[in-house]
Image: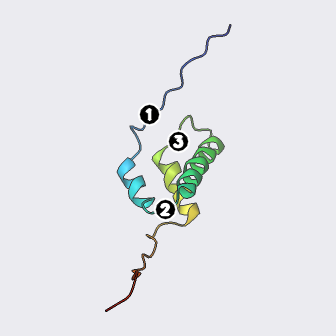
């Protein structure tokens, strides 16, 4: 049997708080798109891992730099 190495993941070089702020109130499909697109960009650039720059580029391609507009909706009757 061939020896399989364990795949390890590290987020030491990624600003998780910055990414979470940019993806706050976004659907999970947007988060999934950003991660997958960042991985595609990393592969195209022959990078061994996804970096902060790859994630930033994927976010800019998605066009979600601004937070979504939150509408105040009144539920029920107004007095």
Using the image, tell me which numbered label, if any, was put on residue 21.
none
Name the image quarter holding residue 14.
top left
Q: Residue at x 49, y 62 (%)?
A: 26
| Quadrant that contains the N terminus | top right
Residue 73: percent from left, percent from top = 41, 81
Q: Residues within 10 Å of mark 2 (few under 14, many from 20)?
A: some
Q: Residue at x 40, y 83 (%)?
A: 76
Compared with 11, 65 (above or below) is below
Residues under labels 1 and 2: Cα distance? 24 Å
Residue under numbered circle 3: 50
Mark sitting earlier along the chain (2/3): 2
Residue under numbered circle 2: 26
Residue 10: percent from left, percent from top = 44, 33
Residue 28: percent from left, percent from top = 53, 55
Residue under numbered circle 1: 10
Residue at the outermost bottom position: 79
Residue at the outermost left position: 79
Residue 62: percent from left, percent from top = 57, 62
Q: The residue tagged with tag 1: helix, strand or loop? A: loop
**Do tag 1 and tag 2 residues touch (Cβ < 8 Å)?**
no
Residues under labels 1 and 3: Cα distance? 10 Å
Residues under labels 2 and 3: Cα distance? 21 Å
Q: Residue at x 52, y 41 (%)?
A: 50
Q: Nearer the viewer, mark 1 or mark 2?
A: 2
């Amino acid at each position: 049997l061939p020896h399989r190495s364990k795949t390890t993941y590290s987020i030491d070089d990624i600003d998780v708080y910055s990414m979470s702020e940019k993806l706050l109130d976004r659907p999970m499909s947007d988060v999934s798109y950003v991660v997958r697109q960042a991985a595609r960009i990393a592969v195209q650039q022959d990078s061994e891992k996804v970096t902060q720059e790859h994630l930033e580029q994927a976010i800019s391609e998605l066009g979600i730099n601004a937070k979504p507009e939150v509408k105040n909706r009144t539920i029920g009757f107004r007095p």
